[in-house]
Image: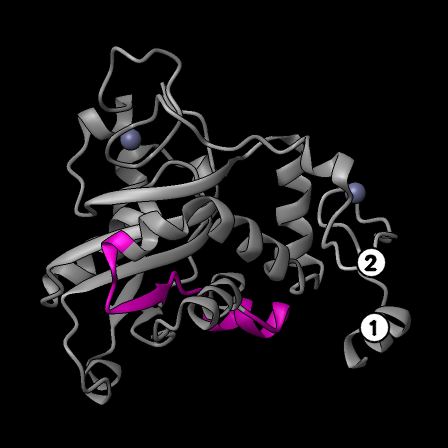
């Protein structure tokens, strides 16, 4: 009753085309969902990027670079449709899209996440300045939504972004790493207020592209005594 009233007052918008969804109980248009490409094999055994040939175990980046995370899970390819959806989710206030992403993510990857059985979910943090502009951290919104459904605690403050880094795209590899090495802090206060074991952590973010942000987060977690770091994202780029 309450939900259907909410639907009338605030009609749901499709996270793909941003039009009003006219089918009751659906979080997106049926047709739009067909435009999203699920990540399937063959994929990189480390980061989970889809690969073109199945004669490779790892993508070019994971072969070349050291990785502090054990493995990554991603739901969809970061294609044209998802680029728009992610931009609306992140920058245009459509935080409610998290519900759709979570529903789809758990349909496809719940077992894989439960197999990892992380002690906590940790969103990739954004800088305070960005948080003020946007009003929320999209990764935190996602982590809470997933954590809610799977009953896994979320440690939103475990990682802190202390430097508002330059857009990574304009930088080369070396500059990227330098840029990111100092960008995150580990909160010992948050760690000690969590009175359970914290051996295994699942990082949560909206998109995985070069992997340098995830790598920087994984590294600082491991440097602070977390034994295993995994990650999950809604979208991922293509591997080669
Ligand atoms: Zn649609
Ligand atoms: Zn990879």
Residue depicted at x 72% and y 43%: 16
* Residue 177 part of the magenta-drawn span: no
For residue 117, above or below residue 52? below
Q: Closer to the camera, 177 or 144?
A: 144
Q: Quadrant of ligand 1?
A: top right
Q: Closer to the camera, 143 or 6?
A: 6
Characterize the local packing of mark 2: few (<14), some (14-19) or many (20 or more) Cα atoms within 10 angstroms: few
Numbered circle sitting on residue 24: 2
Q: Quadrant of residue 114?
A: bottom left
Instruction: Give residue 75's position: percent from left, percent from top.
Output: 48, 41
* Residue 119 part of the magenta-drawn span: yes
Is residue 56 toward the left or the right of residue 13 in the image? left
Marks 2 and 1 close (CB-CB < 8 Å): yes
Is residue 181 shown to the viewer in this render?
Answer: no
Secondary structure state at the residue bearing disc 2: loop
Q: Closer to the camera, 42 or 122?
A: 42
């Amino acid at each position: 009753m309450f939900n259907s009233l909410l639907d009338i007052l605030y009609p749901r918008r499709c996270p793909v085309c941003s039009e009003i969804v006219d089918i009751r109980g659906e979080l997106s248009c049926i047709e739009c969902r067909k435009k999203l490409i699920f990540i399937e094999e063959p994929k990189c055994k480390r980061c989970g990027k889809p690969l073109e040939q199945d004669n490779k175990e790892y993508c070019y980046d994971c072969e070349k670079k050291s990785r502090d995370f054990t493995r990554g899970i991603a739901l969809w390819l970061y294609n044209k449709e998802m680029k728009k959806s992610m931009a609306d989710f992140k920058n245009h206030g459509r935080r409610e899209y998290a519900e759709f992403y979570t529903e789809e993510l758990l349909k496809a990857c719940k077992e894989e996440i439960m197999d990892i059985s992380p002690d906590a979910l940790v969103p990739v943090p954004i800088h305070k300045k960005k948080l003020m502009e946007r009003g929320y951290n999209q990764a935190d919104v996602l982590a809470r939504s997933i954590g809610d459904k799977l009953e896994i605690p979320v440690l939103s403050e475990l990682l802190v972004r202390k430097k508002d880094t330059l857009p990574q795209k304009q930088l080369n590899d070396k500059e990227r790493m330098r840029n990111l090495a100092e960008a995150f802090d580990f909160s010992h206060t948050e760690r000690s207020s969590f009175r359970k074991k914290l051996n295994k952590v699942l990082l949560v973010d909206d998109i995985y592209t070069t992997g340098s942000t995830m790598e920087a987060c994984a590294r600082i977690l491991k440097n602070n005594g977390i034994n295993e770091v995994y990650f999950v994202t809604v979208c991922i780029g293509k591997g080669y």
